[in-house]
Amino acid sequence: MKHAAPLIYLASQSPRRRALLRQLGIPHRVLVPDVNEAPLPRETPEDHVRRLARIKAEVGAMRVLKRRWPPLPVLAADTVVVLGRTLLGKPVDAAEAAAMLARLSGRRHRVLTAVALAFQGKLQLALSDTQVVFRRLAASEIEAYVASGEPLDKAGGYGIQGRAAAFVRRIEGSYSGVMGLPLFETAELLRKIGIRIP
């Protein structure tokens, strides 16, 4: 079976973002920008995700130019979980994942995902802001979930598309945004540069 030629570069190794692009029917090629994701002092969560998505797209576009690859658009995204004023990124280990989940237990939090698209020297940005409410979690549930290994590469220490779906009492916003690539916003950015979503 012949694969379709890529329409864009995806500046991310995330298997979830790749699956979401496939859901839209967008063939793509992965490139991995090396970006420092540490927040800046006094940076708001919104500014943080926008800045990282923009930098990932710009670094990706520079790599395409440098390596003389076909000049396709570069799509990048960044996701953070925000509890109050605290950013929860990807946990460094199982203990940090468990601590994050204990903090999210029985509470409302926000999931911010910024999407950036770099093409022909121009950059577009969109932001998805979703409210997620967790039910109260027992310590044994947190322990079992962390032991599954699922939380370790995910902002906030959980994946809504996996076992943690059972923790979510309510969601207001974009389900795909919580997964790491809001499809509505992504499709809108792609349409602006002439890529039609079937």
Image (cartoon, rainbow, N blue to C red):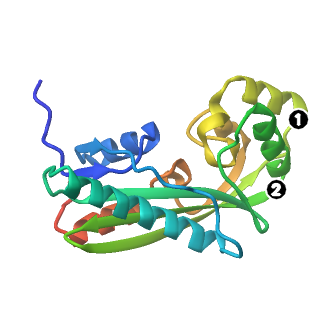
Depth check, front residue: 61 or 135 = 61
Q: Is residue 190 above or below residue 35?
A: below
Task: Bin the neighbour count of mark 2 within 10 Å (Cα to Cα): few under 14, some 14-19, many 20 and up.
Answer: some
- Quarter of the image with the C terminus is bottom left
- Residue 138, disc: 1
- Residue at 65% x, 45% y is 90
User: Splitting the image into 4 quarters, where does residue 158 fall?
Assistant: top right
Q: Secondary structure at mark 2?
A: loop
Where is residue 27? Give x, y as percent: 22, 44
Q: Residue furthest left?
A: 2
Q: Secondary structure at mark 1?
A: loop
User: Splitting the image into 4 quarters, where does residue 28 fall?
Assistant: top left
- Residue at 66% x, 36% y is 151
Whichever of labels 1 and 2 marks the residue nearer the N terminus, that label is 2
- Residue at 77% x, 60% y is 108
Q: Is residue 3 above or below residue 192?
A: above
> Left or right: 196 with respect to 90?
left
Q: Can the viewer see residue 33?
A: yes
Task: Bin the neighbour count of mark 1 within 10 Å (Cα to Cα): few under 14, some 14-19, many 20 and up.
Answer: few
Amino acid tagged 1: Ala
- Quarter of the image with the N terminus is top left
State the residue position of label 2: 107
Q: Is the residue under label 2 in contact with that under label 1 (CB below 8 Å)?
A: no
